[in-house]
Amino acid sequence: MSAESFKIKNKNRLIHASAGVICLLYFLVSYFFLWWEFRPRMVNPIEPAIGAVSITLCCYLIFSSLQFYLPRKNQYIKVLGICLVLTVISLAISTFSLLQFFDLASIDHFLSRLPYRFVINFLVLLMVMIINMVWNIQEEYEDNKRRKEESEKLVREAELYNLRQQLQPHFLFNSLNSIIALISSKPDLARKMTFQLSDFLRGTLRKDDKQLIPLADEIRHLELYLEIEKVRFGHRLHTLFHYEENVLSAEVPGMIVQPLMENAIKHGLYNVTGEVQIETHIHVEQQLLVITISNPYEPDQFHNAKGAGFGLRSIQRRLFLIYGRTDLLDTYQQENKFIVSIKIPQHDPRIDN
């Protein structure tokens, strides 16, 4: 509401300023030509003043009646017709007014210059009409652009929300199945895992309203997830984080790392016997926060080495929707490790220090 009022107020200021400039310039030019023609005699300023007022009234008539007018391609002749009518009106006002103040000799002089005045008034009014239409076209363009941006933003937010909601049930179902399996054999662990799952989901709900969060918050949330997974897998799961304290202030999309860790645990533990170590390296490189997660795998059992699973596709889609880039996620193999790397653009130079 306030933005719209400010916009209208600016347009009114432009109208008054344009009308004032036209009135002043028309008066000065008319007075100069009269002075040049009749010098050294004194020139009565009433005649140019009446002409300036009449042309100004026609300008206000254009601004008020054609405030939102946008002509179509076949209506430009109509614009010229409106200018002709307004030109005749301006000259009629000037002629009628001059009859009240001047003698017949002065009126004859005015009428002798009428063709020139007609051309000048027509050009001035045509210029005013063109300025008014250009302003209206610009306003319509800005409104359409704003509506398009708002519509695209709503679509992106809806798709981002949908992607996050699709990722969470997969982890939730696995955790609930593990809790069910632990209830009879290890009820204490089942209760502990239930509380941890509750804390994890509560933190997830808090982050729904925030697109970007500090990396420190993301890591704390990730630790809750890992505690749940360690209850499921026991001593088999080991995780290591490698990062410096200065990167914790970097901003990342909420829950961007958890699906990557879930993917690493899935392929690292499900296809490998014995203990498994998953390593996470975080560093900043050329204004990009680089997060790399590696997990071991057995090449003869690994059927998704290219990382084309739903989780990784969803992460890539989220990164594209937020940053508009398709090169922020990379997967590759190195010896017996599968590595996923994501890059998060940063705009704070302090995290490089």
Image: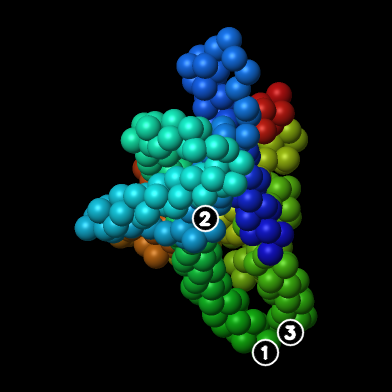
Query: What residue type is disc 3 on?
Result: Pro
Query: Residue 104 placed where, x, y %?
Result: 49, 38
Q: How many marks?
A: 3
Which residue is tagged 3? 187
Residues at marks 3 and 1 touching, judged by CB atoms closer than 8 Å: yes
Query: What residue type is disc 1 on?
Result: Ser
Q: Where 337 sits versus 2, above or below?
A: above
Evaluate whether residue 273 shows in this view.
no
User: In the current view of this chain or complex, which residue is farthest to the left?
Assistant: 74
Q: How is the image coloured?
A: rainbow
Query: Residue 325 placed where, x, y %?
Result: 42, 44
**Distance Cα–Cα, label 2 vs label 1:** 86 Å
Query: Residue 21 placed where, x, y %?
Result: 59, 34
Q: Earlier in the sequence, mark 3 or mark 2?
A: 2
Quadrant of the drawing holding the N terminus: bottom right
**Distance Cα–Cα, label 3 vs label 1:** 6 Å
Q: Quadrant of residue 32?
A: top right
Q: Is residue 47 left or right of residue 127?
A: right
Q: Earlier in the sequence, mark 2 or mark 1?
A: 2
At mark 2, the secondary structure is: helix
Q: Which mark is residue 184?
A: 1
Which residue is tagged 2? 61
User: In the current view of this chain or complex, which residue is farthest to the bottom?
Assistant: 184
Q: Where 229 sits versus 41, above or below?
A: below
Packing grade of label 2 (10 A; few <14, some 14-19, many >=20) is few
Query: Residue 84 placed where, x, y %?
Result: 34, 50
- Identify the residue at horizontal 39%, vertical 31% (top origin): 113
Which of 123 and 304 lies nearest the eye of the viewer? Answer: 123
Q: Is residue 346 left or right of residue 301?
A: right
